[in-house]
Amino acid sequence: MSTPAEVEGLLRELSPQVLGALVRRYGDFDGCEDAVQEALLAAARQWPAEGTPANPKGWLTTVAARRWIERWRQEAARRRREETAAALAPPPAEPGPGVDDTLTLLLLCCHPSLTQASQVALTLRAVGGLTTAEIARAFLVPEATVAQRISRAKQRIKASGAGFRLPAEAERSERLAAVLKVLYLIFNEGYTASSGTALHRVELTGEAIRLTRQLHARLPDDGEVAGLLALMLLTDARRPARTGPDGALVPLAEQDRSRWDAQAIAEGVALITRALASAPIGPYQLQAAIAAVHDEAARYEDTDWDQILGLYELLDRLAPGPIVTLNRIVAVAMVHGPEAGLRQLAAAAAEPALAGHHRVDAVRAHLLELAGDHEAAHAAYRLAARRTLSLAEQRYLESRAARLRPPARA
């Protein structure tokens, strides 16, 4: 007898395969996705009690197809087309070997006509197999908001005329880049929640890693897919040491590295080593290489900051962005001293993308603390704490400020 957790894992693995089989047969992404969700709910209720069927994918495909046909017949009846509904073929056969439905689904869910928020929600629903309620809880937004995003996304896909097939070769690389960005966003939101009381949302990091593994299995020679999976594994490996017993954030320099996940680190290092040796270098590979340098240092004091700075300078040329800029400035400070970092930060803070960002204040506070200007560092930590929406980060920044609070004047 399977446990509910085992059933849940199996259903999430099978969800995109079943949806792909239905959409390939009926071409109705919206209706098929709803039918698959109903089949998944039925399985989640029945299988833990009655046992997993011998052919779970076939069971789900049959149930989902029946649900779709029932809905189609109801619609057909309203349109006086029962005779057409009666001619429907039996449930679709499973696609043959070589048919890559998960990849096709991921590319469809990241269609360029959709907003990024809709791409994220639809990917988690259609490929991840999460319910609307689960997605809403993970992102701390109302369930109605997520439902509306998913509904509009499916309507836009239908209106665009996109079929259930891999896009043309000329478009595929752009669509794959959108998929990687969506998976990266899901992981980052789980690893450092942008709002709320918790620092981590493990359900999102776990789902991002699972989906990226699926993508890597289908595109094993793509260096950026391998780089993204390596980056996730190398980053998530530190999660056990990233918070204290009270849930407070523990900075990298103070983490107990014996608590890091050695198996995830080994897998991530192997992935990025192979990718860098065999594929054109891309931004995710560079970020993974940086994470590997951090993870392979036995102590914080052993970190090879020269190598990290070189990687950030390359990343800044290849894929510049505000967070890359801030991280590069920290590396500059670790190699050339905090004063050098502060000079570069003063120039970067004037950029519109960084103006007023709490992480600018947090980096400034850190560099001022390294430079020994504790009074200015205290003020910068307080300002960063006021500007962040994450309560976990706010508590951490306030605690750093409290350590540097200037003595009261007599």
Image (cartoon, rainbow, N blue to C red):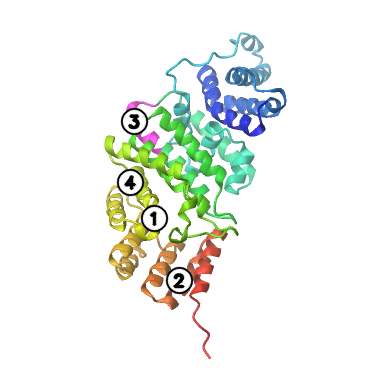
What main secondary structure does the magenta stretch of the protein show?
helix
Are the residues tagged 1 and 3 within 8 Å (C-beta)?
no
Are the residues tagged 4 and 2 within 8 Å (C-beta)?
no
Q: CA distance from mark 1 to mark 3?
A: 28 Å
Quadrant of res 169: top left
Secondary structure type for disc 3: loop
Q: Which mark is residue 323?
A: 1
Q: Which mark is residue 286?
A: 4
- Residue 40 magenta-drawn? no
- What residue do we see at 48% from left, 35% from top? 211
Q: Earlier in the sequence, mark 3 or mark 2?
A: 3
Q: Earlier in the sequence, mark 1 or mark 2?
A: 1
Instruction: Give the residue type at disc 2.
Output: Ala
- What residue do we see at 70% from left, 25% from top? 46
Task: Count up the numbered dots.
Answer: 4
Secondary structure type for disc 4: helix
Secondary structure type for disc 2: helix
**Placement of 4 over or under 316, stated as above or below:** above
Q: Which mark is residue 380?
A: 2
| Residues drawn in magenta | 167-178
Q: Earlier in the sequence, mark 1 or mark 3?
A: 3
Instruction: Give the residue type at disc 1.
Output: Ile
Are the residues tagged 3 and 4 within 8 Å (C-beta)?
no
